[in-house]
Image (cartoon, rainbow, N blue to C red):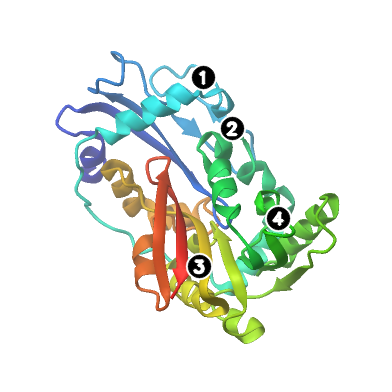
Amino acid sequence: MRRTRAITCLGGAITTAIVSLGAVCASQPAYVFISLRASSPHCRGDQDCLHETSINLSDDIDVVDGSSGKNMPSPTNISHQTRRNFAACISGLATVPIIAKESAEGLTPDQASQSYDTYAATYDKLDGGSIASSLGIDEARAKLLGQAKGEVLEIGVGTGLNLASYGFGEGGVTSLTLVDISEGMISEAQARVQQMNIDKNVPIKFVQADATSELVTIFGENKFDTVVDTFSLCVMGNEGAKKCLEEMARVVKVSGKILLVENTRSSNPLIGSYQDLTASSAADLGGKGCVYNQNVSQMISGTKGMRLEKEDSFAAGLFRSFECTKV
């Protein structure tokens, strides 16, 4: 009860705060939607900035107004102005102290392999859906991965949703090695490649491997010009993510690029505290093992040979992109 009151009662600044969360993992963001009535100049009267959203990983998305239960427009119809209002509302919330922080672990390599084999066939329905687009994830992918050059290694390729964001051929990606721990995911990515009109002069290789321990063993050091990962670190847990970053730093060439888009702890204190309180249960109950409150910036800073050049956040800092260089 004390936790609930601490989150929902902020000295009158918020009269209602209902957080509904559906966390998804490798190549999947953790989605958090908040129904708020806040004393903010960006929210008109009692009008909610955004509506409570319930996400079932196997069902369609149902959007409900948190106060009345009325059906509301789905995220596909959320306008740019609405998203801006939402960001303005949550950015003005009072600071919330972290009451407790759950210790959350990601999946083991064996668990990840088995789990994602079962998710593979239906994975695109969420990761490539309208919610990802409305939150700016598709735009972030395209902007970051357009920088990939030369011999490229992608970690956690999943079903291959990143493939459309690469520029293949001269001046862009000249070879592409795609790694995943799940055989089922690799099969889906292979099928996607077959359907795409990719330059035949660009070799594409698929490798089933554990990115937390096998990259250097398989490929050797200083092999790739660019290493890419999107939304995989959270599935590995904090320790696994650190090991994966170390592997990336070793297989990329000196002055090469490491490009990441990851789930991160929100820069908004309210949401960040909620993530800390629920990280373990969210990972276990629908999150496909994703630890969605990681401090990826700190992990990068602690990785030998990796220098963070640029960091961009979106969706209140729930997701961030990172441009890094091997030094």
Q: CB under 8 Å between callouts 2 and 3?
A: no
Residue bearing the label numbered 2: 61
Q: Quadrant of residue 68?
A: top left
Kind of residue at disc 4: Thr
Local packing at callout 4 (Cα closer than 10 Å; few below 14, some 14-19, many 20+) is many
Tag 1 near tag 3, CB within 8 Å: no
The quarter in which the N terminus is drawn is top left
Q: Amino acid at mark 3?
A: Met
Is 193 left, or right, of 61 in this rendering? Answer: right
Number of numbered tags placed on the structure image: 4
Identify the disc placed on residue 159.
4
How far apart, in angstroms, are the residues tagged by discs 2 and 1? Answer: 11 Å
Residue at mark 1: 72
Say which residue appears at 58% left-offset and 83% top-offset: 216
SS at circle 1:
loop
Q: Position of residue 57 (x, y in %)?
A: 60, 44
Which mark is first along the chain, 3 or 1? 1
Q: Is residue 188 left or right of residue 141?
A: right
In the picture, the disc for residue 216 is none
Q: Which residue is mark 3?
A: 236
> How much space separates mark 4 and mark 3, taking CA atoms?
18 Å
Callout 1 amino acid: Met
